[in-house]
Image (cartoon, rainbow, N blue to C red):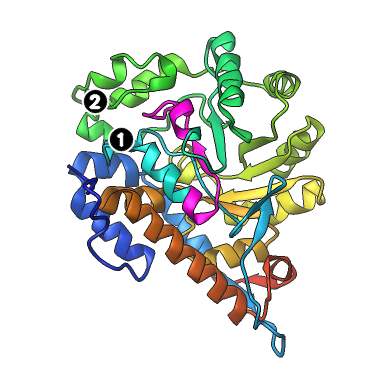
Amino acid sequence: MACDDSGGGAAAVWLDMEDVERAAAAALPPDVWDFIAGGSGRELSLAANRAAFDAVFVRPRILRDVSGCGAESTLLGRAVRMPVAIGPVAYHRLVCPEGELATARAAKAAGVPFTLATLSSVPVEEVTAVGGSVWFQLYWLRDTGRTLDLVRRGEDAGCEAIVLTVDVPWMGRRLRDVRNGFALPDHVRAVHLGGGASTAHRGGDGASAVAVHTAETFSRSLTWSNVERLRECTRLPIVLKGVLAPEDARRAVEHGVDAVGVSNHGGRQLDGALTAVDALPEVVEAVGGTCEILLDGGVRSGTDVLKALALGASGVLVGRAPVWGLAAGGEDGVRQVLELLAAEVTDALGLAGCAGVAEARELDAVVARGRR
């Protein structure tokens, strides 16, 4: 079994996310690790996500009282202990028997929202029963009726936001999965899509069964009219995730979304897509403070969070790192990841001369010369 679900928790103290990544890679079967860690194509965008963060430098301020430094903030109008939410990742039971339940409990303990994926392996009703703040990530399905049923189901279960992912008409060519002929094991099911065996469970040479399944299920005709439809049918805040162009960010505001998610899907969709870090300043300018801006893709530390804030983000989504913690240590592993990140965020804020998150958004952030 990939994670320790016996109550013993993670076996080691992790000092940074690279420690967590190594522990997860050692714990998981190679094909499952590739499914989580990999990107599309030559993985250029996957690597660029980290390179973009590494090229941003913040100009600290001095002689400021940071004795009461803290990372508390708000996201979508709700108080959070740090400007971070766990991003949507499919099939947590691939790495731990308790799956999304363990992740949700750790998020609750950390005081951050947990975004439950459409492709969750645990039903939304069981996850929201844990308590805490749960957002529901939505893929628009070929069947619009089923899509809106998922929205209502999330609302009825107590979810606090809908995160509509708009950059997946079909899955990018994730060559690690193709080479592995990756398929879901029998015990891992897409519980919100019927929960039975599907093409996602039928592997074969030269194909990703998960990609085949999503190609059969996801809509390829998602347009702004669908965003209008969603806005009309839900009272919940809407995050539009997968925005990189400032023109699209402006249209998102015009269509009534509450937050824009600047993202290239963790380098897992169009290989060669611009990184979220590089797209962020233009998106910030385009929306002009009219909605919140969340960034995801490559966040691995508290200094990354600081950089995102300095570039204008309201907060960040972290996807892979909590799943690494889940794989290596179950619920306690996710807790360690979030505690580590919280400590790093506070450390980065204080050392930058910021008593809180609001001051971080006033910092200068510059890109190192010569990166391109």
Residue 41: % across, % down: 37, 40
Q: Point out the tag, 2 or 1, that comes first from the N-terminus.
A: 1
Residue 266: % across, % down: 46, 46
Position of the C terminus, as image quadrant, is: bottom right
What's the residue at 36%, 29% (across, down)? 121
Q: Which residue is mark 2?
A: 187
Left or right placement of residue 326 versus residue 168 in this view: left
Q: Is residue 372 visible?
A: no
Q: Secondary structure at mark 2?
A: loop
Please state which amino acid type lies under the numbered disc 1. Answer: Arg
Q: Quadrant of residue 237?
A: top right
Please state which amino acid type lies under the numbered disc 2. Answer: His
**Foreground: 370 or 73?**
73
- Classify mark 2: residues with Cα within 10 Å, few (<14), some (14-19) or many (20+): few
Mark 2 in CB contact with mark 1 (< 8 angstroms): yes
Q: Quadrant of residue 355?
A: bottom right
